[in-house]
Structure formats: structure tokens, C-alpha cells
Amino acid sequence: MTAVPVETGPKSSSERGALARARLLRGLLPAMSLVLVLLAIAWLNPRAISYFGFSLMLNLAIPIALATIAQMFVIAGNELDLSIGTFVGFVGCVTATWLKDAPLVGVLILLGSIGVYALLGALIHLRNLPSIVVTLGMSFVWQGLAILILPKPGGKAPDWLLSLMAFKPPFVPFPIIAALLIAAVVHFGLMRTSYGVILRGSGGNEAALSRAGWSLLKTKVVLFALTGLFGVLSGMALIGITTSADANIGNGYTLLAIAGVILGGGEFVGGRVSPIGAVIGALTLALAASPLLTFMHIPPDWQVAANGAILIIVLAARVLISRKER
Amino acid sequence: MPETGADIIRLDGAEKHFGAANIDITRLDGAEKHFGAVRALAGVDFHVGAGECVGLVGHNGAGKSTLMHMVAGTLVPDSGRIAVRGGIEDNYSVPRAQQLGIRCVFQELSLCPNLSVAENTRINHPALRGFGWRRKAADLIAAKLDEIFPGHSISASDIASDLSIGRRQMVEVARAFTVTQDSLELVILDEPTSSLDAHTAGQLLAFVRRFVAAGKSCILISHVLGEVLGNADRIVVMRDGKIVASDAAKAFDRDRLVTTMGGAAAREKIAAEIATQKPETGPLRVRARPARQEDGNELVAHAGEIIGLAGLAGHGQTDLLLAIFAAAARAKTGIEVTAPVALVAGDRQSDGIFPQWSIAQNVGISSLARLRNGLLISPQREAELASFWQSKIGIRTPDMNNNIFSLSGGNQQKVLFARALGSDARIVLMDDPMRGVDIGTKLEVYDLVREEAGRGRTFLWYTTETEELDNCHNVYVFKNGRIVANLGRDELTEEKIIQSSFGDAA
């Protein structure tokens, strides 16, 4: 029986080649949807495709991308963060007040809030609580704190932050560079480093990980702390752009961030996430949000619905590809 | 405990045994474990020597897996103590076991489905880190796969969920034998061949012999008694959480093993029974032609027949079963199905079980129409159905309302059988459902299948274990997605099947 090929059933290399192709196709889906939105914009208003146009359209893309990355970390561990929006608002209020007036206190508060996120991760793991419930509760805490800090819109961003966000590099608009940078850094950290594998593995098969001797408490704490870190970055970037804060400024980000992760090829369970996809998803949502729809003369009331329609179309396409994969 | 007389000295706060010339790799004394009301282990003494392959057999629920979890450090005994290479371990844990060179391949697949083969290797090796770890991990696992399974066609960059269940098991086995910083002394293989076909299983067992010959140790758990008899140096038999026999493998034969395990084996009885109760040809139930079939061969099943689907793993048997299942709901060309169909899945973790549900709910899901009371499911009827099947098929649990995961693997599989047989389906498709199930459970299920067939049910049974085909009236052998042979009851031999599955390969 020596000359017999081993288990060369139909489920062999050719079929796995097809699986890999479908996977590639699914991986390209976020990029294709971004290109589609760009083409639509170019068709509606060719002048928008310019340095100035992109700077304007992608104005808010950086904070959205950062918030999406924040959400992606918890999703990688099979959890969900419903408080990221109000957390971004809270960070914004701290940035526009304490961080400008008393930088040291501001930095301490922001570091402390990342610590709170880490503790939430520990709590969720140790008490086996559903993260949706815990973070939903926390969203009211962050909102309340934000209102306490800034009862009415106001404050001012620190000057260094303003000048950073107003940075105008030659040829390529700043938001695009920032997006590339965020995607590259997070991709390297989560997808290429050896500990990133452990973090993603905790979403894929917890039991296998703990049998191999890894601490699930640690992975959860790290994932939540990273969410806090990127939430802080998102809030600061947002205030750098808007220059002043408002307690409700980040409220829309919760769902936007979840949508961005899913649009970017992530899945709610199973540790299947893609940092590059998430950033692309965030860009797509940021682009589709206002400029495209304003060009199309769609009233603002309907823009949210149009955003949802894009999401549904992309997800439907993904399901079709996945079905082929079977 | 035979070695309590040995000198015990204190060294670095830990007790050390000396005296015995061949120090055991691992030794458990009086290990006990309870899960709630269920006693899984009742004071077990167990040891493995260096250069020894210990075969561990027993029914599902006999306590084998619990015992192995203790050796591997994933479970802590309620009482009793564990010693590794003579040193008593007070704080024994998984990292400590790995440090000491003890690895385990668990029965449930423990790869992360979202990670690549190389990344899954990294998970078991904290030393694989820093610059270039991906390359190192890929080389490590690829070399080991080449060594154990020559010609395996698995790439280190394949994502685990893309691999067939057999290949995933190959990866998992190979991963357990990879070495980085910690030494490797003892590998526990819990049902390592359950998803492998005969050829790859042979490769693995040959490797285990080489491994043991090199002075390392191995614990082999298998329900295929031939594997244990042929490869173990010593065989330990467990029953009801206790060790009931431990002797050199040479001292056992198949019959003695089965008797010691307490299983009522009578392979000949089955064959005789099948031969006598050859049914008169009933009405046609299934006529199916595989999608890749080019000649006129097709699968035909009548009421009351047990039809076997044989051949190497992954050669289109499952695809045909799934096609038949789909055809029952929606007409499909080339497949004719004349009665309701139920499927018993092979990969029970991913395709069979509702993990959040109770045992009773898992049984009842295929019979909802009959369990209904008005718009709602009647809990009473659900409980009746569940308790009927509990006694009929012997599901061992104190309460059918417990979560399905409170059951051992074989009992979970029984629940899936109860689900299919409890439904009104006249055709039952079985996708290698007895994988990793102990022989006692198997024999019970075989009896049930034959009994149900006698009542006019039709079974299409894909199996990788040739012995199971003894239960069939007719066997179709598959190769590359096609039916290559149709063997009647009287012409059925292992040689014929192997010949057909490997035939015209050259």
C-alpha cells in the first residue's frame, strides 16, 4: 500500500484552493465596497476626488477608524462594547478641559480610564458576565461623567492636538496617511506578533488556549485595555478636529464602530477579525455617511437609513460568497 | 502503593523518591474526582514508566478522560497525589506538566479554528516568539507532519477551519510531538485515530512505536481494541471510575479485554443475526447517484435495509449523505427520496449538539411537531420523550434537564441517535457517528439500529470502521466521490473493501 496517495479525497488541495480563493474574495470585499463608494462619489461630483475633497470628506474618518479598532479588540475576544460611543464622548470632554488646563491630571484621568477598561475585562471574565450588559451599564456611567465635566458644550482642545490634527502633508491627505498608519500598526500587533495569535486564539477556542497553559484572564484584560487605549485615542482625535467638546459628541460611535468591524470582514464570534478590514470599513462608513448622500440630494433624515442599506448589501454579498465556500 | 518503602528525602522543599531503579514518568496514587453527584474517579493508582506505551481502555464514562486530564494537569484531583519522575507535585498545572514534558492530545479537537496551522502550533509553544517566529513555527509543524504522516498535503499556512476533520486531527497529533524548549517525555493520545482512515492511522501508530522505542512514553486510549492490543506494552482497563485490570499486552486478547471492560461483545452474533433477518425487499426509499458518478452505478436502499457506505475517509460519502438529506426537502436531480429523513452528524461538536440546551431539549428538537401543545412546546411531552429514550438507549445521567455537556462524549452521541430515532423519519442517515465511542455503547447502538431496521426503517451508514459494516445488508465502496463497488452481505470482506477503495489508483 506504499504507493497509495494519502487521503487524497476530493477534499484535497484543489478544494482547499477554492476555499482559499473564496477567503481571498471575502477579504477583498471591504476594499471593493470602499472602491464602489468612491466611484459613486466620483460619478456624482468629480471635483470631490482631490486633495481638498478627500481632506474634507474624510474629516471625521480618523476618530471613527480608531473607535472601530477599539471595538475590534473586544470583538476578537467574543465580547461586545456598547459603551465605546459614550466613552469617546467622555474622553473628548476630558481632553477639552483637564488635558488643556491641567495636562498632568488629564493624562492621569485618561490612563485611569484605560485601567477601568482593563478592570471591566477582568470582571467580565472572572464573574462570567455578559459583556453586553456590563458595557451597556458603563455607557451610562461614561455619559454621566461626561455631563459632570462639561454640562454644556464648550471647552477647547490643547493646541498641540489642534496642530497635529490640522497637519497637511504634501500630496496625500492626512486622514488617508493616518488610516494607513493605524491599519499597519494594529495589523502588525494583532495579526503578526506571537502574542497577537494568543489574543485571537482566545476568541477562537478558549478551552484549547487554557489547556495550553495561557491565562484567559490576561487575554481578556489585554483586549479590554487595548479597547480603552484606542477609545482614548479616538476621543482625542475627535476633539482635535472639532476643537471643542460636547458630552453627547461620541454617542453615534457605538453602532458605527460595530458596523465598521463587521463591514470590514469581522465576525461577532470566533476571533475572526481584520484590522485592515476594520479601518476600511470605518472609511467606507465615514465616506458614505455624509458627502455621498449629500451629493445625491438625500435629506439628512434618510442618510442613516442609506448607511444601513450599504451595510446590508455588503453583508449579503459576504453571505453569498461564504455559501459558495461550502 | 508498592513503593512507599522507597527512601524519601526532602530536597528544595519537595519530596523526592529514590530507590526504584526505573523511576516512573508519572504516577498517581489514590486519585479521586467528583463532578457534582457523579463520581468520575474512585481512588485510582496509575503509573507510566519510561519507554512504555500504556494502552487505556474502557467504556465511555469509565473515567479514562478524567484520569488523563489529571495527568495533563487540566484537572486537579479531589484527593490523592501525583508524582512526576519521582518528585511529588503539589501545585500541578498545565504549564508545570508541559515543563516536565507531558503533553496531551484531547479527544475533542482543540485547535483554534480561526488560526492557521503554524499559529496553532505557536499556542502550545511559549518559546515560539520574537523575530521570525512565524517561519520557525511553520517549519516546526511541517517537519513533524512530514515525519509522522509522509505525503500529508497539509500546509502550515492553512486555516484550521478549512481542513477536514481528519486533517485537523493529524495537525493536532503532530503538534503534540513538536519540541521547542521543554523536553518531551510523555504524550497522551486520546482517541488519536478516531477521525483518521486506516492508512493514516497506521502511519501514526508506526510513529508511536518509533517514539516509544526511543525511550519516550505514551498513553494510548482507543476504542479500536486491535490498535491497543497491537501497539501497547501494557494495557490498563477501566470501569466505573476504577482500574479493574492492568497487565502486559501479551496477556490480553480481544475476548479477555472485552470481558474485562464488561462489554457484551458478540461480533459473530451480529453477523448471524443480519444474515438470518435479510428482509424481503420493501418499498424503495432512496435512489441516489453521486454528483461525480460517470457510470451507471447508483445507491439504492429499500425499507428495512441497512446500507453501508465504505471507503477511505473523505471520498464523497458525507457529500452523498448531505445531498440525500437536502433532496428530502427539495427535489434534486439524480436523487429520489420517498420518506422523511433524519441525519446523525459525525462531527457532533459542530454539527450535532445545541451546546446551550439541556439533554431533553437536544433529544426533542427533531420531534417538535409531536411535542406541541397548541402553539407552545409541552414540557411534559418533551420530558416523556426524553425519559423514554433515556431508558431505551441508556443515556447515563441523573437528570435529563442537565446541560448536554454534562454527558461524556459517547452519551452525547447517544442523544443524537435518540434525536434521529425519536423523530418520525423513516430514513436515517449516519455520518460516521460512532467515531470515538466505546465498544459497549457501540454494541448497544448496533442492536438498536438492527431492531429499528427490522421495523422497516432504512439506514444509510457511512463508517470508517470496517467492523461496523458487519451490521449492513449491502455496502457501497466510495473512491474520489464515486461508487466503485457494491458488495452484498455474503461477498463482504475487509480485503474486498480495501481493494476497492485503493483500486485503479495507479
Image (spheres, coloured by chain):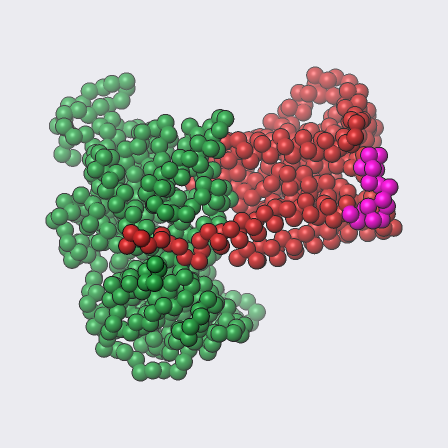
Q: Residue at x 38, y 68 (%)?
A: B483
Residue B311 in the image: x percent, y percent? 34, 62
Residue A111 among those drawn in magenta: no
Return the residue nearer the eye: A169 or A307.
A169
Q: Is B218 left or right of B105, judged from the image as shown?
A: left
In the image, the chain rendered in green is B
Residue B177 in the image: x percent, y percent? 33, 37
Query: Does residue B192 appear in this view?
Result: yes
Residue B34 in the image: x percent, y percent? 32, 44
Return the residue nearer the eye: B168 or A146.
B168
- Report which quarter residue A235 is drawn in: top right
Return the residue nearer the eye: B73 or A97.
B73
Specify the quadrant that holds the C terminus of chain B. bottom left
Q: Is A146 left or right of B331, judged from the image as shown?
A: right
Please name the color used to draw chain A.
red
- Report which quarter residue A222 is drawn in: top right
Q: Is B221 left or right of B288, judged from the image as shown?
A: left
Q: Main secondary structure of the magenta part?
A: helix
Query: Does residue B74 appear in this view?
Result: no
Q: Residue at x 77, y 52 (%)?
A: A305
Residue B282 in the image: x percent, y percent? 36, 82
Q: Residue at x 24, y 40 (%)?
A: B210
Q: Residue at x 37, y 42 (%)?
A: B145
Start and end of the magenta stretch? A39-54
- Vertical placement of A246 versus B492: above or below? above
